[in-house]
Image (spheres, grey):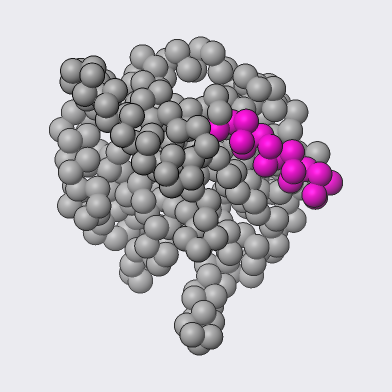
Amino acid sequence: MKKEKTKKQDKIDKIIGGVSLNLKYPIVLVHGMGFRDRKWQVYWGRVPKMYRMMGAEVYFGGQDSTGAPETNARQVGDTIDEVLIRTGAEKVNVISHSKGGLDTRYLISTLGYGDKIASLTTLQTPHHGSKTVDWLMKFPRPLVRLAGFLTSAWYKILGDKKPAAYRCFELFTTQGAEKFNEENPDVDGIYYQSYAFVMKRFTSDFFMWLTSLVVGWGEGENDGLLPPSSVMWGDFKGIVRSNSARGISHADEVDFRRRRFTKKSGDGVCDILEIYKKIVIDLEERGF
């Protein structure tokens, strides 16, 4: 077991390449929909360990799996308040995946946390909604509401304090996203940046082949859930592609498989940790 852990740590060491961070502010990782921050199954895979090995202070948002931004943002805000007290820092850098980016933007714009957050990096966040969700919401509304109710009930059992799946469904429509953007504009003084990811084919990820096929039919290349056009926000860093045959799925973006994509070199990244390393090095260079 110790040898296995050492091998994994050695692999992370190779990716780090001797880089040691001196970030001005701690990092808060804010997860997406459907998962919780659990110690035994970390949402972010090897990312927190890598950041700590690089010398960064890392914390987790701690919000509900299916909560609406209105409630999830307060939970993330409580976490940030605790982090600032514990570390003595003036602000934090937030890195959010998927819906976590919307929770964080609501926290910044509506709840007034702009003076406590230095930067927001969003990975595949549906800032502009999804045309596929628009289509799904055309199903008989009682059925959609029932799906939302059952989803919320299940996540309530799993520990959510205030699940609101149907509210999330509405938020993911293009109209819902437009309304959200109008109500939650960017705040001056905060650095916003975003990343997009795509799979190479719908069969690349066993868990996302169906959703990727559906989204691809109506919106083109995607990561299994969203096309790049949905996730561009602030300083858009472009579409990240891997040099493997699978590409990068919505799950791969948070290191779900906890291993690199391929040992081969070539165009694109061979390990998702390369992107997370790039993010924090860039933040440090910007003085965050």
* Residue drawn at x 39%, y 17% as measured from the top left: 176
Q: Give the image location of residue 225, x and y in percent.
A: 30, 38
Looking at the image, which is closer to me, 65 or 94? 65
Q: Residue at x 51, y 12 (%)?
A: 182
Q: Position of residue 49 (x, y in %)?
A: 58, 64
Main SS category, magenta section: helix
Q: Residue 71 location in percent, x, y?
A: 56, 28
Residue that extends furthest to the right in the rendered view of this protein = 88
Classify 177 as above or below 159: above
Q: Residue at (41%, 50%) from the top-left corner? A: 253
Name the image quarter holding residue 137. Answer: top left
Establish if 1 lies above or below 282.
below
On the question of residue 121 being in view, the answer is yes
Front residue of this view, candidates 81 and 213: 81
Q: Which residues are magenta?
A: 72-88
Q: Is residue 217 left or right of residue 61?
A: left
Q: Quick one: 105 or 187, which is closer to the camera?
A: 105
Q: Is residue 253 left or right of residue 70?
A: left
Examine the rendered structure and indicate whether residue 89 appears above or below residue 15: above
Q: Is residue 74 magenta?
A: yes
- The quadrant in which the C terminus is found is top right
Tell me if I can see residue 236 in this picture: no
